[in-house]
């Protein structure tokens, strides 16, 4: 039991070293009475531009009577007794497991699931279609410099999954011991930056695409040290069943026997989706995010978000980010905002093109970009089968590839103001995309429901920014890989596929997560479900 202190507001200039004094004052005790305390959450309040503040929540244990302190604060909504259930994960299952569990995919869902299975003694085998993260970094840099596209080592495929090159945001709407344990694992694995807000409590924790590879590699090494195995350039091509149960998977490197398979394939393994559908694995079409990416100069964002003292706050806080929603028949909202970042190609198939954003740990690019996306309902998929949403993505990505010069991989781009006015595409201002842009009417690469929502929502966002959101902003697109258009069905309690016992769909590609942390937590909980059912392998 601890005391939860909520909504303690302090000027951003206030150092964290002064927190015990402020916390003791809020509780009416001496700093010496604080036996233990931790920050639960730290969020930036931008509403008063004259004085930006951090808003803190704490858990506190006192030397004396905690109940008496809470009683004195009776009536205050900011002080209450709070009990957080402890993190628990143990192997209690009794069902025999004749083979080591297989985890398909080494994104956050697969890696974290494999890590906790390894920690419990199950010695999992991880099958990754792409390369090690060190080789992947080299291939991505070669591609950005104008080199060839590598179909199994790119921004989406390879060790760490799509999240490795997608900014390193560790934001998660969920809370509780499972979320905290995942963040602790990332911090342990080289994810904590000295002098930076802790990823354990900051409301928008950010590692950067230059730091995530070290975290990914460290988790993989822990899996191997615990008896697990990671096989790279091993693409799963089929699942084998007998008498309704899994017997193993066929891969590009041969057959792997397995009666438990964790399916953490990510949202871009379209060949795997097709294989699963052909094999009758229960799946459902799912609404997904589609849109464009908008880019501004970062100093414009800082001035809008930080106000008249923005230069001072830039020194204290670094570059500013933002979050906006425009209401309409289909709401338009910002997604994966990359302060001080870069627009990148989000490509996993030859003949297709889409965009994404990333930033490095320092967030020091002169540009800021964000996805502007709409949740596309199933009724707009131009088909009724389970893969109709995926084909919708492919339709517009193929058109973008063609408009961008094919294997030149230039990016379709348009001034935001021209898009709203339906003006002919002019040469766009300078842009952070590495392989060059081509002026394009972006309506050619967007479904009508998305194009209409973008055109309707952009002026709303511009009014929020008092005319600074549209001016000189560049749109690129399509932003087609924000989420999976497919859900691989699973039972709520057992987490297994209802049609394929032993198959465990996990993470963003299975339709159960929306980011690095939520996918990792989903992997952790699946490891817990497996350990509760199956005995360790011999």
Image: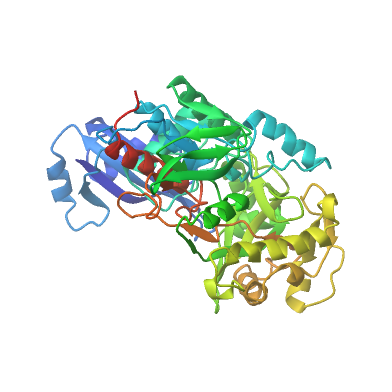
Quarter of the image where one finds residue 318: top right
Horizontal side of residue 55 vs 90, given as left or right: right
Which residue lies at the image location 58% right of the left edge and 62% below the top edge? 334
Q: Is residue 436 visible?
A: no
Which residue lies at the image location 23% right of the left edge and 56% below the top edge? 76
Which residue lies at the image location 47% right of the left edge and 24% below the top edge? 222
Horizontal side of residue 428 vs 191, given as left or right: right
> Between residues 186 and 196, which one lies in front from this camera angle?
186
Q: Which colour style is shown?
A: rainbow
Q: Position of residue 63 (x, y in %)?
A: 18, 31
> Between residues 279 and 61, which one lies in front from this camera angle?
279
Q: Position of residue 143 (x, y in %)?
A: 78, 41
> Between residues 513 and 189, which one lies in front from this camera angle?
513
Q: Position of residue 59 (x, y in %)?
A: 29, 41
Check the image and report above or below for 198 versus 370: above
Check the image and report above or below for 302 versus 463: above
Which residue lies at the image location 53% right of the left edge and 71% below the top edge? 378
Location of the C terminus by quadrant is: top left
Q: Position of residue 458 (x, y in %)?
A: 65, 72
Q: Is residue 216 visible?
A: yes
The total number of labels drawn is 0
Location of the N terminus by quadrant is: top left
């Amino acid at each position: 039991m601890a005391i939860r202190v909520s909504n303690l507001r302090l000027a951003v200039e206030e150092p964290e070293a002064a927190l015990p004094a402020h916390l003791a004052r809020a509780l009416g005790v001496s700093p010496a009475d604080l036996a233990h305390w931790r920050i639960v959450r730290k969020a930036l309040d931008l509403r008063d531009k004259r004085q930006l503040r951090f808003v803190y929540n704490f858990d506190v244990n006192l030397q004396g009577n905690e109940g008496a302190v809470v009683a004195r604060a009776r009536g205050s909504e900011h002080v209450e007794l709070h009990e957080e259930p402890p993190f628990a994960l143990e192997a209690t299952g009794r069902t025999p497991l004749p083979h080591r569990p297989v985890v398909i995919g080494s994104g956050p869902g697969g890696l974290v699931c494999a890590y906790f299975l390894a920690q419990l003694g199950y010695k999992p085998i991880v099958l990754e279609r792409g390369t090690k993260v060190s080789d992947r970094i080299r291939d991505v840099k070669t591609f950005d410099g104008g080199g060839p596209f590598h179909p199994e080592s790119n921004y989406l495929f390879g060790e760490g999954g799509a999240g490795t090159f997608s900014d390193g945001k560790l934001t998660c709407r969920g809370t509780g011991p499972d979320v905290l344990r995942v963040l602790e694992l990332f911090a342990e694995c080289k994810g904590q930056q000295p002098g930076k807000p802790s990823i354990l409590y900051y409301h928008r924790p950010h590692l950067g695409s230059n730091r995530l590879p070290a975290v990914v590699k460290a988790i993989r090494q822990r899996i191997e040290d615990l008896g697990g195995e990671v096989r790279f350039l091993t693409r799963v091509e089929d699942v084998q069943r007998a008498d309704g149960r899994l017997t193993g998977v066929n891969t590009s490197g041969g057959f792997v026997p397995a009666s438990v398979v964790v399916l953490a394939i990510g949202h871009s393994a379209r060949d795997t989706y097709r294989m699963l559908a052909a094999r009758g694995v229960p799946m459902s079409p799912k609404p997904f995010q589609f849109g464009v990416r908008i880019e501004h100069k970062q100093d414009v964002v800082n001035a809008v978000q930080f106000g008249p003292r923005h230069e001072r706050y830039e020194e204290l806080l670094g570059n500013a980010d933002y979050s906006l929603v425009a209401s309409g028949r289909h709401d338009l909202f910002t997604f994966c905002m990359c302060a001080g970042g870069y627009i990148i190609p989000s490509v996993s198939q030859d003949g297709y093109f889409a965009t994404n954003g990333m930033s490095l740990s320092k967030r020091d690019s002169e540009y800021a970009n964000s996805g502007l996306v709409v949740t596309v309902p199933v009724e707009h998929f131009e088909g009724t089968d389970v893969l109709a949403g995926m084909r919708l993505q492919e339709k517009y990505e193929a058109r973008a590839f063609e408009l961008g010069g094919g294997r030149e991989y230039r990016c379709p781009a348009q001034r935001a103001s021209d898009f709203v006015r339906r003006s002919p595409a002019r040469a766009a201002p300078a842009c952070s995309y590495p392989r060059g842009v081509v002026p394009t009417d972006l309506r050619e690469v967007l479904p009508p429901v998305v194009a209409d929502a973008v055109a309707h929502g952009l002026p709303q966002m511009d009014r929020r920014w008092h005319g600074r959101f549209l001016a000189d902003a560049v749109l690129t697109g399509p932003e087609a890989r924000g989420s999976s258009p497919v859900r691989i069905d699973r039972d709520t309690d057992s987490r297994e596929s209802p049609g394929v016992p032993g198959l465990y769909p996990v993470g963003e590609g299975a339709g159960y997560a929306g980011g690095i942390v939520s996918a990792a937590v989903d992997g952790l909980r699946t490891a817990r479900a497996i350990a509760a059912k199956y005995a360790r392998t011999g």
